Image: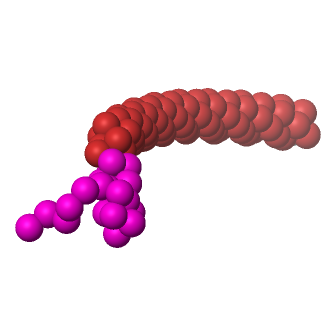
Amino acid sequence: MVSRSVHRLGEMALRSATLLARTVFRSATLLAQTVFRSATLLAQTVLRSATLLAQTVLRSASLLARTVLRSASLLARTMIRFVSLLPQVMIRSAETEIRPLGLAGPPPE
């Protein structure tokens, strides 16, 4: 009778250990799958964010380059216009200064 009880106790212990092992294995498997999915989603999110950031930086750099180029072009055109008008301004200025001295001939009527 004692040996039967011991035998039954051993079977119950074996079943409990087997059930526990299966439960632990299932839990570990589910945990591993969850961690893998989370890591995959995180990697995809980081990749998307990095891609969007790179595109934004590229667009900003492109806009900045165009703005600088337009500003430089406008400045160059302004300087060319200024330099081309400078002789006329200097001549008019000289005429204005010479007339009061009576050196430029009779005053215009």
Q: Position of residue 58 (x, y in %)?
A: 44, 32
Image quarter (top left, top right, bottom left or bottom right) of the N terminus? top right
Residue at the location (83% across, 33% down)?
10
Magenta segment, which residues?
A: 89-109
**Is residue 66 at least partly visible in the picture?**
no
Q: With 57 as the anchor, is 94 left or right in this view?
A: left
The chosen color scheme is: secondary structure
Q: Is residue 104 in the magenta section?
A: yes
Residue at the location (35% across, 57% down)?
103
**Is residue 51 at least partly visible in the picture?**
yes
Q: With 99 as the anchor, is 68 left or right in this view?
A: right
Which residue is more in the foreground, 62 or 30? 62
Q: Quadrant of residue 94?
A: bottom left
Q: Position of residue 65 (x, y in %)?
A: 42, 34
Q: Position of residue 57 (x, y in %)?
A: 47, 37
Residue at the location (30% across, 55% down)?
104
Magenta segment, prevailing SS (helix, strand or loop) = helix
Q: Quadrant of residue 22?
A: top right
Which residue is more in the foreground, 101 or 17? 101
Which residue is more in the foreground, 74 or 23? 74
Q: With 47 as the anchor, is 22 left or right in this view?
A: right
In the picture as drawn, the residue positioned furthest to the left comes out as 109
